[in-house]
Image: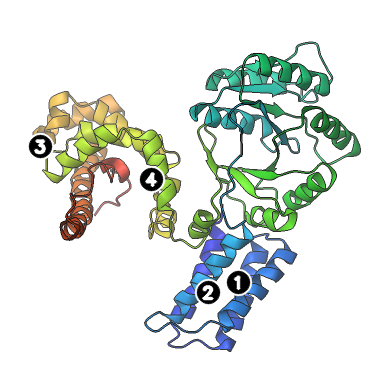
Amino acid sequence: MFDALGERLEGVFKRLRGQGTITEKNIREAMREIRMALLEADVNFRVVKQFVKDATEKAIGQEVIRGVNPGQQIVKIVHDELIEMMGGEVAPLDLKPDKVNVIMLFGLQGSGKTTLAAKLARRLKKQGRRVMLVACDRQRPAAIKQLETLGGQVGVPVHTAEGQSDPVKIAGEALDEADRASVNALIVDTAGRLHVDDELMAQLKRLKSAVKPAHSLLVADAMTGQDAVNVAEAFHGQIGIDGVCLTKLDGDARGGAALSIRAVTGQPIRLASVGEKLEDLEEFHPDRMASRILGMGDVLSLVERAQETIDQEQAAKAQEKLLSGQLDLQDFLDQMRQVRRMGDFKSVLGMIPGLGRQIKELDFDESELGRVEAIIQSMTPQERAFPHVIDGNRKRRIARGAGVEVADVNQLLKQFEMTKKMMRGMLGGVLGRGKKRRRRRGGGAVPPGAVPPGMIPPGMIPPQ
């Protein structure tokens, strides 16, 4: 989403790092470029003006720290200002454990409310809460059926009130049912329009007054540009919201409008949808997003995703086999499947510091991972365990079974060996440094499983 903005800012910082000393003139020139980069990324002009003013004042008043490149200090200032612009701190939902917490979702038609309702239901259910969905969108014909389908996928009941057309009555009935069933979170999917109008606002005001929600969340499409800011202002001014959920953050739009919503409304961005799958919903962390924009990676989010999707015991065993030189293709296939469950592969690797820009430049088709899987599955257990036994006849049989050329099998085997060497070197360095630090402190080694061996699969490494 923020690749173009990140690249523009990286260009500014690169020129600054080339300066032996930094002057007020350098700073003002850099800030002019940063201003243009933010405006081109569709950040609201009022927000850009305040951002540049604050960053310039801090940069000019900053003492140069001895031993630190002046350009790096500007990066730090811009990083801090980005965090501040997006809210400063994470703003989780505040749900009481002993009552029905109503969560109302507002937004225009097409913003992704219904899908986000299901994603939120899945997230809260995983946290151990009893959740119910309510279909209060009576405007869009397919909305009720869509919510029922999604509710079934996440294993959450859906209150549909067939035959009823008044959203206020539907929500009231759902509230009573939730109370009887000891539901902790009642998520209300409301109607949207293609634009903000009086009829929509009047209906939502009545609904909000009837259910008295714990949270009133605006669902905003991050790809709609400045209109997302205008919609946020309209909903907050007329109904009152206490948070924003951004959808389609995995898209390829400029994305700057998403950075403006917090500054314009004063309300925090609470959640972000980062993919099409129902598990692709995260708490919005301003500091992590700022790091992603500036190409610094996002290790914490990467670790959290890994902990949720990767079998740590299996990863630890694979890591031990890798270090001892015994990792085989079956181990690698198992690990690669687990890593793929973490989401879009390029976005996952982009969270690793220093890899973000390189991954973007790499000509990699994610369907290649499917080809790798097909080739390995066409092998016998013996061939997966001992790839060196694969001769010309075996390669031809494997290629026929996978629907590929023999050259593809050769390339996979070669890249698998390269991957093992690369990962062994990475792990050896990390674990070696960790052991030295822990010896000094009297502790053990870095826990196994810290780096999944399937993180860089064959196909991501260009052939030599």
Check disc 2: other Cα within 10 Å, few if <14, some if 14-19, many if 20+: many
Which residue lies at the image location 30% right of the left edge and 52% below the top edge? 462
Viewer-side residue, 329 vs 393:
329
Q: Amino acid at mark 4?
A: Val
Q: Is residue 104 left or right of residue 82?
A: right
Q: Are circles 1 and 2 on residues that touch, CB within 8 Å?
A: yes
Task: Measure the alpha-carbon separation of dots 2 and 4.
Answer: 30 Å
Give the percent coordinates (x, y) of residue 417. 18, 45
- Which residue is disc 2 drawn over? 12
Query: Is disc 1 in contact with disc 3, using a CB cutoff of under 8 Å?
Result: no
When the figure is inspected, residue 25 is found, relative to residue 15, above or below; the finding is below
Q: Residue at x 80, y 32 (%)?
A: 208
**Residue identified by numbered label 3:** 388
Q: Is residue 38 above or below residue 97?
A: below
Q: Are marks 2 and 4 in contact (CB under 8 Å)?
A: no
As displayed, is residue 220 above or below residue 77?
above
| Amino acid type of the residue that numbered disc 1 sits on in the rendered structure | Ile
- Mark 3 lies on a secondary structure that is helix
